[in-house]
Amino acid sequence: MLHLGLAQAIWNGSRLAWPSWSNGLQNFPPALRSEEEALRLELARRESDPENLASALDRQIRKRQTELLDGITAYRRHAYRRNLDDPPVLWSEGSARLLDYGGDGPPVLLVPSLINRGYILDLSDSCSLARWLAEQGFRVFLMDWGAPGEIERRFSLTDYIAGYLESALDAVRQETGARPLLLGYCMGGLLALALAQRRQNDLSALALLATPWNFHATPGQAALGRAALASWGGVMDILGELPVDVLQSLFALVDPMATARKFRHFAHLDPESAQARSFVALEDWLNDGVPLAAPVARECLGGWYAQNSAHEGQWRLAGRPVRPDAVDLPSLAIIPSEDRIVPPGSALALAEALPDCTIHRPKAGHIGMVASRGARTRVWEPLRDWMRGKAVS
């Protein structure tokens, strides 16, 4: 309903705004400008008589509404269901588990975000970074945070990193007898960075995929953090967590029409095609998010976003500031050029602060870098090649 409402509001705004289009789009907010521009260009191609513009606009909006609803209906009816069995659990505590994907060779510990399910790195039988790395000569472990339970609702980032994540690292060290390579994705990269600072003698290298650092690299992040806390702080006090629907709403504000565009595209796909199956697999994962513990949400929204605490040296873990320049490990930063969730400038600030960092900038999006048809050649293989030179067996 959120995405349907956003799309309808923007299309209704187009009806109201069309008389001023001849004066350009400077009055539209940047987040909406792409949709208005697309409508205007499409109408310009189709309609030569200005008097017919209003009726042509209505036809185009109805067409887009139909495509969006058809795409959502096709998604809900699709037969695909994720049927991968979880690998063995090496360690667990509270809501967290450490999954052991096996493999022979140097160990790798994968750290996903706390917000989304970790199986984005093990999405399907045809798209699994974790299983692929195991086939490529690594012993792969994946941190599965789970959903916050009664204990985790009181957790801070210190509890997650100095508690669960350090215990998982200890389990990997004990199991393999080697120093693993640590790989963090998105928010998981920030968790991995903090762990690397605390335990770098127990690690061989650090890889960061689309990891933010300068949260004010693009306008609006500070206002987003403050507004989210002002709107939902009371709810968090009651529930002990920031609900997943609120998190989805915050992500939707980054690009309000993204969901409408992708479902309109999906409406035209052959449901039996590999592309359609991949879409459904990814959409199922996106709709399987988890809430965020209230203390963590406050650190992220009020600290990272509102105050830019990470970049300003004010983010503290167990009382100590988290400092990239203190991480003396070979590092790799993969910064996708088409990332809307983590703007490249935000991730680049972290890469430039690390003392020994290789930067790879593939043409990919935030999720596409790990779960698209081009991910293997653009991201996975360069990642594997770098890891082979840095990991210690």
Image (cartoon, grey):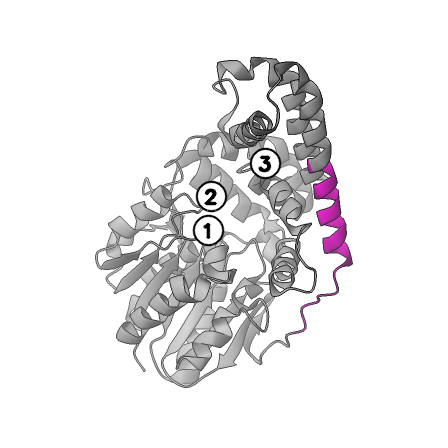
Give the main secondary structure of the magenta stretch: helix
Give the vertical position of 83 relative to 222 (above or below): below
Magenta-drawn stretch contains 82: yes
Pointer 3 or 1: first along the chain? 3
Residue 57 occupies which quadrant of the picture? top right
Q: Name the residue under label 1.
A: 365
Which residue is depicted at the point 55% across and 54% down? 155
Please provide percent x and percent y for residue 308: 39, 38
Residue type, mark 3 in image: Pro
Most extreme residue toward the left is 355
Residue extent of the magenta highlight: 64-83
| Residue closer to the observer: 275 or 368 | 275
Q: What mark, if any, has residue 340 been given in the picture?
A: 2
- For the residues labelled 2 and 1, say whether their Cβ atoms are less than 8 Å apart: yes
Quadrant containing the N terminus is top right
Mark 2–mark 1 Cα distance, whole angstroms, equals 7 Å
**Can residue 386 be seen from the camera position used here?**
yes
The residue where tag 3 is placed is 256
Examine the rendering and report whether any part of residue 149 can be seen.
no
Q: Which mark is residue 139?
A: none
Quarter of the view holding residue 381: bottom left
Which element carries disc 3, helix, strand or loop? loop
Residue 23, placed above or below residue 89:
above
Q: In this view, does 275 lie above or below 338?
A: below
* Label 3–label 1 contact, CB within 8 A: no
